[in-house]
Amino acid sequence: MRYFPPKLLAGCIGLLLLGKSGIVAQNPVIRDQFTADPSARVFDDRVYLYPSHDIVAAKGRGREGWFCMEDYHVFSSSDLIHWTDHGVIVSQNKVKWVDSTKYSMWSPDCFSRNGKYYFYFPSLAKDTIYGRGFSIGVSVSDQPAGSFTSEHEPIKNVHGIDPNVFIDNDGQAYLYWSARNIYVAKLKENMLELDSDPQIINNLPEEGLKEGPYVFERNGKYYLTYPHVDNKTERLEYAISDNPMGPFRVSGVIMDELPGGCWTNHQSIILFREQWYLFYHNNDLSPKFDKNRSVRIDSLFFNDDGTIQKVIPKLRGVGVSPASQKIEIDRFSRKSETGCTVVFLDTLNTFNGWKTILDKKDAWIQYNTVEFGIAKNKKVEVKVSAKTGGTLCVRLDNADGPILSEIKVPASEDWITVTSRVSRYEEGIHNLVIVLKTDEPVEIDWIRFIIN
């Protein structure tokens, strides 16, 4: 049985009982824009997500065919399912030292100290007095979602990308960044200046690109995580030390190269309500162009000796989905080997998401971890399209599990919403499975249960 942190489960059930509406988002977690390089932080029992913001480059706006980023948004969630976009917090044309013609607002981070929130970001400077290449700046706020005020100059003696901040239990703060190697230096109490000379973190793989450091502590051990190109694309690796400045010992792989061929990956790892989570990115919403990426989340687990169990990327993502909300089963946990495909609803606008196509009798798709709550479900709604009609069977737990409802889908050229009676009800958390009972193809967008 899968473990669900009690606090997270209680929060999801609370949303169910409130009867909130809307699509339940899974991987990727942000669907209305491209997001990458996720830095996740927990502030006041809420997760704040600080990603970079990919946009499509065009003539006069960045370098075509390359990464293009002009600003940063911040998102927050209490349950890792429903995310609030708090809008732009830092923009390239509002930071004094940044060259706003370069669209180079790359991977950021944010940390809290003494009631202030410090947002760190790399960019190219418009003045050569700051040196060649990327510099790293800081914006400061009284709230995790802003408003942020940017310092007039970048941090002195820091040149590189992918800033990451870690504060140890003794109060000492550290800044990590990458520039061919991975660097570390102590930060002063003001979080704006270095308190030691930068030093290279040694003993990491010598061959291949290393970048994107993210450090956390667990049981007195310090984990340095980083993307590394061991072959052709990045995989997520980690090293362990007894000291936040090293020496570190390479300890394993967190996530293998992504199967879709996305050249980059970038990670952060947090403990939230008794469960560890890995935030990373893939090019789900831009499969033909991997410079437009999207943030994902999966659960992360440790072995008894402190090593990390390898994370297998999943479309389903994390969290408990209330049955009363629209569930996009195309973010599936499992599906039949034949007769089931997932494609974009609109290839010209991938932000519209995906649909499931069942086109062979007994083909099925399964979506795990649905909370049916304490109220009885008497009806089920499904958004479908079937040119010649068909019949769907909704089951619990697996493709041969108890039948909740049989849905007769009328013939239609367009998307329609069909409502059907629920013949059986079981409380608690279950997997949800939709099975095609006829040979006629049926397309499915979402499903939800109507709760008394």
Image (spheres, rainbow, N blue to C red):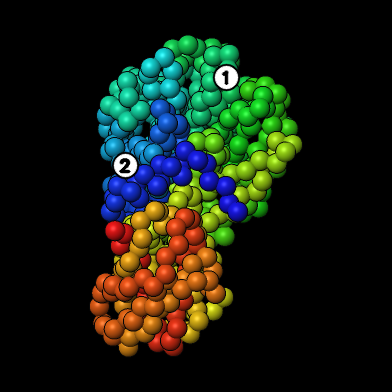
- The residue that appears at 53% across and 71% down in the rendered structure is 401
- The residue that appears at 45% across and 51% down in the rendered structure is 320
Question: 451 or 101: nearer the eye?
Answer: 451
- The residue that appears at 67% across and 21% down in the rendered structure is 243
Residue 94 in picture, x, y percent from top left = 27, 29
25 sits left or right of 159 in the view? left
Question: 375 or 371: nearer the eye?
Answer: 375
CA–CA distance in space, label 1 to label 2: 30 Å
- The residue that appears at 39% across and 62% down in the rendered structure is 328
Position of the N terminus, as image quadrant, is: bottom right
Residue 157 visible in the snapshot: yes
Tag on residue 84? Answer: 2
Dot 1: element? loop
Task: Give the tally of numbered discs.
Answer: 2
Q: Amino acid at mark 2?
A: Thr
Per the image, the residue denoted by label 1 is 168
231 sits left or right of 142 in the view? right
167 sits left or right of 43 in the view? right
Residue 255 in picture, x, y percent from top left = 61, 49
Residue 205 visible in the snapshot: no
